[in-house]
Each structure stands twice: as structure tokens, then as C-alpha cells.
Amino acid sequence: NWEDYYKSNSRAKYQYFYYDQKTKRIDACWWYDLRHKLCLPLKGRYWRNKRIPLSKCWLPDQETEKTLGDFLPVIDLSQFGDEQTQREIEDWLIREVGVRTQMAKLTKDDWYQIIAYHLPAQVSEEKANRSEECRKQAYNCYKAFLDWAQDHQEVDQKFKKCRLLCQYQGQYTYKNSDECVIYFDDDFKRTQHFMDTICVFNLPSSYRSIAERYFGVVPVSKAIKREIIYSDQRKPLDEQYKEHVNRVLPYIYAVRCREAPKSAEETLKKLKNLEFYIEDSLSERLSLESYTKEVSDIAWAFEEIKQNGKIRIYLRQAQEYYIASAIAEALGVPTQADFYENLLRPQEEKDIRKRLFEKGLNQSDVEDALNRWCDNEQLEHIGSEQQERISESLASTDTIQNWPEELLSSSAKSGEVSVRLTHESKPTGGTTVGGSLQRGGEASPQSETPASGRDKGGELRLVDPENSSYDVKYGVSKNLPPKELSLIHI
């Protein structure tokens, strides 16, 4: 009887010396042999003739059975009499022997055995091409592994050597990254144009980054090159419709702040730089490896202008779905297009907030994001006002060319004069000689100007516009007022 005799004798006392005598409890030899040498009957044709020690066998729970049952050595309890006896044996194996039941108990080596050996053996290429159910079983196994891998930071390079079930030239086959480049299909609309030439691994886009790390696959969105082909007939999006879109953008920003807080600043910059155009004729030229495809009559496209950071979105029609899809792809989250479309539909602000709350955001998340959005708009407004003031200050210097010759210093006569524009006041009808502004037309003593064209206090120099060109710069200096205008001789 287990409780009366065997359980108490399953552990033995072990004595050893390390400076002095020490004692600890270990498995008795007979109990160790039972757990690590005894082999029980297993379920499934694949496992039937395999000898798997009891310690490596499974009695999976319902979720684990559904996802990985065929890929695990599961004890066949039907070989142990009636249902009552089976339940008693199952309970004893789990409680006393420690037979595993949950997917979380799988180790890295267990997963490697499954991905590298058990899965290809049970879902052969022939079965994968014949049965959609078999393909689904294989891909559910890959997803389960990547879900497990999300919680483990260390990446074992041996998984990159595993053969993955891929689609190649219309057939399902096993390939690894040493044989060819395996592309992760995270952009189906564009990938489909190359399906007859490239090897594609099909999983939902949410698994892109972790699959890239563990399996060494290459996302199509990173590898493909796009060239937009459009006419010169484009026109800006209708102002009323644009105002509606701009009303929703802060809420899209709030969602992205919650989902990817580390890239919140980049998201803000992208959303602020969006420009929308209606284009009657829109196509794109796609290039992947050495293959090129031209796709005509596409519904939308976007391009980033490197010179100014603007993101231009071209639309054939002003529809919520097209706009939402373009914004989602510009932000690198194409799977969010449907959600963005729901936000763009005509509705009150409270309804938009409700959708965000259903997404998992709380009131403080939304308010914080909207405040950051508004703060950024205020800074942009202040910056534009300062630019206008500087432009006015620049215009006021045009009268220098008409100054009397006796007021100009030798440096001014040679075509160069130094002017200081302070932050507190602007030139208003005075004259400037040597860098100081005097009211009533009186000239101050001329200051000495270094050869570099800028004095130590931050004075800036104007050059005769008839004989020279100008480069206007706008910036901040530590030892000067917050804003400064520079006119530098080129």
C-alpha cells in the first residue's frame, strides 16, 4: 500500500562530508528508477512504439491537449481498467510522481524537440498539402511556442536551424534559414504578388518580432521596396473632412502611447506630420529580391519625405477605411486599421472615448495623452509666432542699404555690418552701427568684430545683399536670449 509503506520509503537519507558531516534527503534508488526508467503505454500512432520514461510523460490539461496533444508523449490511461481506476491512477501520477499537465511546464529543450522533430514527423509535407486541419495544427504549435518565448529573454540560436512549415511556389514544405530566405508575411496585400517566387512563413502579424528573433525570418514589410506612381492631378483633402480626421488623431495617439510607450514621441511626430491628398490615378512598383511587380489602381499609399519629415498619404477616395489603413501602416501597425476606422466614423467625443476604454485605456491614460498633444500644439504655435517676429526683424534691416555714408564704419563701407537683435525689443526706427541699436538716429561707438563674423556676445553680421548671398539660420545659444537670428555670409 502506497500510503502505509511505499511513500515513507521513497526517500532515503544521504550522508556526506564537506568539512564536517552533512545529511540530506534524496529519492530512494527504487523510486528514482521507477520515475526515470519505467515506460508506460502512450497515446497515438507516432508514440506507440517509443519508450519514454515516466518523468518525461504528460497528462495534459484540456488547453494543452488541444494545442499540443499530438506532439507530447501522453500516457494512455485507457490501458488501466475501468474509469474509476483510471482516475485514481491519473491522480496518483500527477500528485506523487509529478507528471506534468500544463504547457507552462515545458522547458526550452522540450520545445526544441517538438519544433525540430515531433512536429515535422507528425505533420508531414504530404499531410500539410492535403489537410487544412493539419496545417492549422502545425501553426498553432508555432504560436504556442512563440507565446511561451515572449516571457523568456534569452534567445537560443539553435531554433534558427529548425525547419519551418512554409509556403513555397504554391506548395507547403519545410525549410530553414540556411536553405533560403524565409519571409514572414506581415503584409499580405503585397506579399501575394510574390507568392510564386519567395518562401513565406504564415503567422499573424503580432508574432512578427518574436518570430524574427527566434526563427530568423525576415518580415516582408522590412524587405520590400515601394515606389509610388501618381499623376500631377492630386489635390488636398477637403478641409471639412481633414478637420474631422484631425479631431481623431489625438485619440489614435493615446492608443499608441498605451500600446508602445517607448515610441510615443516618434508616434506624435508622425501624426503631426501627416498630409492627405486625393489622387485620381494611383499605382505602386514593388521590388523584393530581384523581382519587381507593378500594381495599378491601388486605393491608398503613403510616402515619407526625408527633407522635412512629412508623411504624405494619397487616397483615391476620401473613405474612412482607406485613411485608417494608411495611418495604421504609416505607424507600423497595419493590424489596427479596423480599430482606427471605427474611431474615424462620425460620432461624438464620448463615443470615441468609450471605444478607447474598451481597448483597455483608462481615463488618466486618455487625459495624459491629450494633454501632451495639446502642449505640443502650443509649442508649435509659439514657434511660429517667433518665426514671424524674426521675419519682421529681418525685414527692418533692409534700410541699412540707405544709410548715409558718414554713419557707416569702415567695415560697413566694405560691405559688412554687425547687428544685434535682442529678445526683449525689436528695431523700431533707429539706426545700428557696430551692433547697438540707438533711438533717434544716434550712432553708438563701433564695437570690434572678430574675423569669424560673430562677436563674443553673440552679435550677428549682415553682408551687402547686392554682392553676397545669405543663409538664414534660427537657433538657441546658451549665453544669449532664447531666440537668435543669424545672417551668415556664404
Image (cartoon, rainbow, N blue to C red):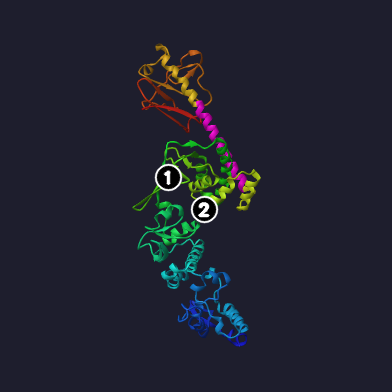
Q: What's the residue type where badge 2 is placed? A: Thr
Q: Give the CA distance from mark 2 to mark 1.
A: 22 Å
Residue 385 part of the magenta segment: yes
Does 184 sit above or below residue 114?
above
The answer to whether residue 435 is above or below residue 102 is: above
Quadrant the N terminus occupies: bottom right
Which is more toward the observer, 469 or 432? 469
* Above or below for 179 versus 374: below
Q: Which residue is mark 1?
A: 283
Q: Horizontal and vertical percent for residue 248? A: 58, 43
**Residue 445 visible within the image:** no
Which region is colored magenta? 365-389
**Mark 1 residue element:** strand
Tag 2 secondary structure = helix
Q: Position of residue 195 (x, y in %)?
A: 40, 57
The type of residue carrying mark 1 is Ser
Q: Which residue is mark 2?
A: 335
User: Residue 97 location in percent, x, y?
Assistant: 55, 79
Which residue does the image show at 51% across and 44% down from the upper left?
265
